[in-house]
Image (tube, rainbow, N blue to C red):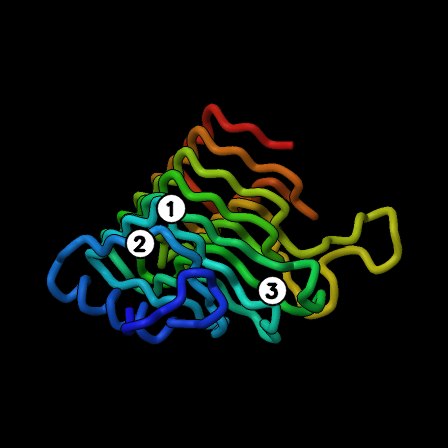
Amino acid sequence: MPPGHVTDGSVSYQRQLQEAIDAAAATGRTLVFRPMRYLLDDPAGLQLRSGLTLWMYGAVFQLSEEMDRDGQAFLGRDVVGVNLLGGEVAGLRQKWPDSVNIAGVRFVGRSARIRVRDMYLHDLSSNGVGVFGGGPDELIEDVRVCDTIILRCCNKYVDYLLPGTGPVKGSERKDQGGVAFYFVKNFVVRGCRLEGSRSDGTHFYRCARGQFVNNVVS
């Protein structure tokens, strides 16, 4: 962090955070975030790298109320061996347009060996944790989401008994589900609390060999 940095989330240091993530991944070190509030103002989010462990207990990642396009706080694309431990992702979905879909953590592409534990994700307009393989021949494998709280997430989904059934304009089915997995094999979701979703608490599509145990969904 730069000299004289603030800790209240009023200034974004997203570029410096990305540089720290890249350096930690390159050397195989665990990156420890100081307990403070970090403003994320670029919806591209922080880009995760293979072999990365983030220790985030006490850290709050505050997404800007100015978000005007889809994105997330953390994105792992084609990554292997990523551990996210602790930390809070705080959204402001009540201030974002319905057409803006912001997730907490997303993994896409040819990814594997993913661990998410002890996180708190809330007030997002897409998934708390979304894991999206590319298809039947491009599965994401070996995923664990444990002891994580996901509150008031997802975008709106119009009930089938009402006009305009389905996701709201600018959103899609993938934005539904506090936890959403597409084309995932060998996964565990355990000990999580999933509450207050505007659509589904969970959303699993074309997944295999999974366990969903000891969770609270309401």
Q: Secondary structure at mark 1?
A: loop
Of the pair 84 and 180, the residue shown nearer to us? 84
Instruction: Locate residue 135 relative to residue 16 in the image: left or right.
Output: right
Q: Secondary structure at mark 3?
A: loop
Considering every residue shown, the one lying at the far top of the view is: 214
Which part of the image, by quadrant, shows the N terminus?
bottom left
Q: Earlier in the sequence, mark 3 or mark 2?
A: 2
Of the pair 150 and 65, the residue shown nearer to us? 65
From the image, tell me which residue sits under label 1: 58
How packed is label 2: few (under 14 Cα within 10 Å), some, or many (20 or more)? some
Identify the disc placed on residue 101. 3
The correct choice, above or below, for 129 with respect to 68 in the image is above
How packed is label 1: few (under 14 Cα within 10 Å), some, or many (20 or more)? few
Which part of the image, by quadrant, shows the C terminus?
top right
Of the pair 97 and 140, the residue shown nearer to us? 97
Determine which quarter of the picture holds residue 7: bottom left
Instruction: Locate residue 37 relative to residue 83 in the image: left or right.
Output: right
The correct choice, above or below, for 156 with respect to 18 in the image is above
Q: Earlier in the sequence, mark 3 or mark 1?
A: 1
| Separation of marks 3 and 1 at Cα, in angstroms | 26 Å
In contact (CB < 8 Å): disc 1 and disc 2: yes
Identify the disc placed on residue 34. 2
Q: Residue at x 51, y 68 (%)?
A: 71
Q: What is the three-letter code of the residue carrying label 1?
A: Gly
Q: Residue at x 66, y 65 (%)?
A: 171
Residue 57 at x, y percent in the picture: 34, 44
Instruction: Locate residue 177 relative to residue 49 in the image: left or right.
Output: right
Instruction: Locate residue 99 relative to residue 81 in the image: left or right.
Output: right
Residue 174 in sight: no
Residue 149 at x, y percent in the picture: 50, 38
Q: Earlier in the sequence, mark 1 or mark 2?
A: 2
